Amino acid sequence: MPLALSPIAQVGVPAGPGVSPHYLEAVRPGAGVLPLSLGAGADAVSVSLAILPAATVRLVIAEKSLKCEEHDVSLPLSEHNEPWFMRLNPSGEVPVLVHGENIICEATQITDYLEQTFIDEKTPRLIPEEGSMYYPRVQHYRELLDSLPMDAYTHGCILHPELTVDSMIPAYATSRIRTQIGSTESELKKLAQENPDLEDAYIAKQKRLKTKLQDHDNIKFLKKILEELEKVLDQVETELQRRNEETPEEGSESWLCGQFFSLADVSLAVTLHRLRFLGFARRNWGNGKRPNLEAYYERILQRKTFNRVLGNVNNILISAVLPTAFRVAKKRAPTILGSTLMVGLLAGAGYFFFLCARKRLFSMFLSIKAKYFF
């Protein structure tokens, strides 16, 4: 699910004179201001955008027991390319955190901010003290895992599904997504013409996108980065084996860098979950291949915070598509018919998801209904 959260002045992107509720209302009329409470209860707006980067931030917030209120920005509807969002983050990338008068962009900077800002005794720390023997280990694996080109894996799985096994992206969606990717370049050109103050930002994003797609549609490039991924996972497998040897007694629990859950574990957990969704799990773990990694992923799936934030891997597709469907229906439905027409428009799509994940869908439907219909 996409997510936007706030930055810190020293790490993030300062918002000039400050990001006030009035500013946010100006860049996106009617959006309103959502209270974002992160420990100290400061006012903020969270714009939810994302998939992998936002999932990382959401998991960090859950692990640190912080409270925030998210606001969805639909990637399928290209809301991250809309002028109001580009004014928040000129790169048009997710996630973004707005906290008080600061805007922070990029997941690593956001998680650093959360770790550095909320340091009271009741807030769990996810990075050891700098002088600790564990600090360089956590930073190494965090940087190693966060540097993986997840956008390339994602586009590669869509453009070349033959590289995947058991991908959660349905075949009928692949062609639609491919078309959407191809049309984004022309969309950015049009937006640059319509918004002269953002022309440079849109042109820069268009160039980045064009370069990326040329690489991501290159089968040799994709095979190369998937081979590099295997080397990274080999290193992780070895590290997990070290943890097993350090705590051989039955019932003892250790994570990637020690007997504590860290930002390195957040990065690894979200990475494995995403790879599973894309269809790259079987080639990387399971059936005796990297048994420590397989056991680690199974433990992650049982962790309460992970289960609450990300849940079953099927939820990635459901949480990305279903809210967007409701939003489209809400925009198009005549006011006089209200929620009745919306429900009718969504019946077909809802039934499909119902077959895929009945229990999960039902709880989501009630939540979305409460949010949009009342």
Image (cartoon, grey):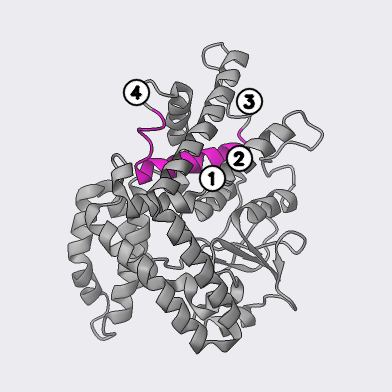
Which corner quadrant holds the C terminus? bottom left
Q: Nearer the viewer, mark 3 or mark 4?
A: 4
Mark 2 and mark 1 in contact? Answer it, CB < 8 Å. Answer: yes
Instruction: Say which residue appears at 70% left-offset and 58% top-offset.
Output: 40
Which residue in the protein does label 3 denote? 259
Gap between marks 3 and 2, in whole Å?
A: 20 Å
Which residue in the protein does label 4 denote? 287
* Percent of width and height locating residue 102: 70, 68
Mark 3 and mark 4 in contact? Answer it, CB < 8 Å. Answer: no
- Residue 277 lies in the magenta-colored region: yes
Amino acid, disc 4: Asn
In the rendering, which numbered label is found on residue 148? 1
Q: Secondary structure at mark 4?
A: loop
Amino acid, disc 1: Leu
Q: Is residue 14 above or below residue 41?
A: below
Write down the region rendered in magenta: 261-285
Gap between marks 4 and 1, in whole Å?
A: 24 Å
Which residue in the protein does label 2 denote? 144
Whichever of labels 3 and 2 marks the residue nearer the N terminus, that label is 2
Q: Answer few, some or many: residues within 10 Å of disc 4's Cα (few below 14, many 20 plus, some between 14 and 19).
A: few
Whichever of labels 4 and 1 marks the residue nearer the N terminus, that label is 1
* Percent of width and height locating residue 368: 35, 63
Whichever of labels 4 and 2 marks the residue nearer the N terminus, that label is 2
